[in-house]
Structures are given as C-alpha cells and as structure tokens.
Amino acid sequence: SYELTQPPSMSVSPGQTARITCSGDALTDQYAYWYQQRPGQAPVVVIYKDTERPSGIPERFSGSSSGTTVTLTISGVQAEDEADYYCQSADSSGIIDVFGGGTKLTVL
Amino acid sequence: QVHLQESGPGLVKPSQTLSLTCTVSGGSISSGNYYWSWIRQPAGKGLEWIGRIYPSGSANSSPALKSRVTISVETSKNQFSLQLNSVTAADTAVYYCAGNLYDTTGYSTVQHWGQGTLVIVSS
C-alpha cells in the first residue's frame, strides 16, 4: 500500500524556521495537503495543493514541492505553532487518499 | 459557513457494526463541487483516511478497510453515513467527517471538519 513518510518529531526555538518534509513516490503527480492538529482538536488545513495557503492561515506557513518530497515551512515559529502536523495526498490512481504518520513539532 | 456534526453510538461491541452519521448544515450536501469524507484517529496515533463519497453516491475507501466499510449519502436529510462491520478493539478511535470543496481539477481547495466523535469497541 502507498505510504507517505514524515519525521516523527522536530524541535525548534521561537523565531527559527521549521521545515517538515513528507516523501512519497506519487507526490510527483499528486498534490499534497498539510494539516495542523492541536491536542483535542480537529485538524486544520494550513496548506493545500502543495503551496496554497487558506484564508486565515498566517503567512509564516508556506509549502513547496520538489520531486517526491513536499515541505511545510514555518518561518518565525511561534509558541502557538507547537502541534502535530500531517501531510495528506493520494496514490498514483488519485483515488485513494493517504496521510503521513505525522510530525510532532515542539517549540522549545 | 458549512458545519458538520458526527453522531452515533459511542460504544460498540466487538464483531458488531459501527454506524455513524454526519449531518451537514449551512449548505446542501448535493450542491456545488463537494465530496464528503470519513477519517479516524486512534488515541495517541495518526490520522487514517477511511473513504469519501460524492453526492451522486460514487464512493471510494481505503484498501485496508474496504471489505468492511460502507459509505452512503442521504441527500434528503443532508447527511452521509459510515458503516464499519465486524469491528475489533483496533477500530477504537475518534471518527471525523469532513467536507471538501473541489476545483475544476478535482482537488480540494476548502475543507470543513466535524469536531470528531469517540467510538470505543468493547464488550
């Protein structure tokens, strides 16, 4: 079955830049989505279609794509950005969606 | 603003069927370019995509769950539903429903999520 691979955890200090990667073979053909999930809350999309930012999401969140890897970048990390981040995309058929395993971002 | 609310039993016995309903408000389930999804999350673990359905009734589901999953839509009630058969303790999770507005390329551009509902499988 198709898988998306993320680092399980990452730590950054406030004001620094966090880059969370997500790798999968079909990412060359399928868009990726990034979700932020705080404890006890439903996930919220912070990036859609690789690079697009929904209204209401701070500009410090950005997305990029290169080959089989997509990256969520959080510039000038703030304490409130501490959360779990998940990527989501589809397999090569475009029919079956998959989530990455998630990355726990800790703001030191 | 589209709002989604999950409902259903919070406790299901092993081997029985888990049944959840998602009620959509603030818009018609059959209007516009929307598809409707189910996602789950076991405690302390990651998100798992279960499947999606279009207002036409066309549905897709995760290969890992496909043999046990039925997703249906009832446009007259503005609801869509999830049935998961032959449940075990491994199916204990928070279950989310979500609505996705998609563009002309078929990709989601706006998402609305329910708050999630905890389903425990236990005798």
Image (tube, rainbow, N blue to C red):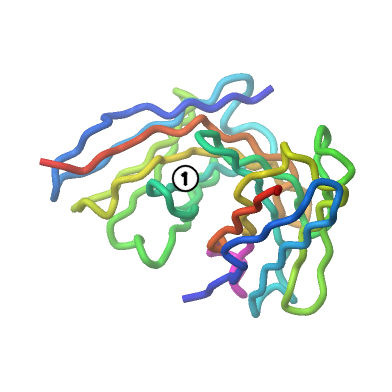
Q: Can you identify the residue that label 1 sits on?
A: B38
Question: Where does the image place residue B73, in percent across and percent down from the top left?
Answer: 44, 37
Q: Residue at x 61, y 58 (%)?
A: A103
Q: Main secondary structure of the magenta part?
A: loop
> Residue drawn 77% across and 58% down?
A72
In this rendering, position of residue B80 left or right of residue A73: left
- Residue placed furthest toward the left: B123
Quadrant of residue B122 within the rendered picture:
top left
Instruction: Between residue B29 and residue B91, name the one nearer to us.
Output: B91
The chain that hosts pointer 1 is B
Q: Is residue A55 above or below residue A4?
A: above
Indicate the amino acid at tag 1: Trp
Q: Give x and y (percent) for residue B28.
A: 60, 26
Q: Is residue B59 visible?
A: no
Helix, strand or loop status at disc 1: strand
Residue A39 percent location from the top left of the image: 53, 38
Is B116 left or right of A89, judged from the image as shown?
left
Q: Which residues are magenta?
A: A89-98
Instruction: Say if the magenta span includes residue A97.
Output: yes
- Observer-nearest residue: B29 or B13? B13
The quadrant where residue B81 appears? top left
The residue at 85%/53% (across/down) is A16
> What is the x, y in percent for residue B101?
69, 41
> Along the line of sight, which residue is nearer the eye, A47 or B58?
A47
Q: Residue at x 29, y 62 (%)?
A: B67
Answer whether residue B73 is magenta in the image.
no
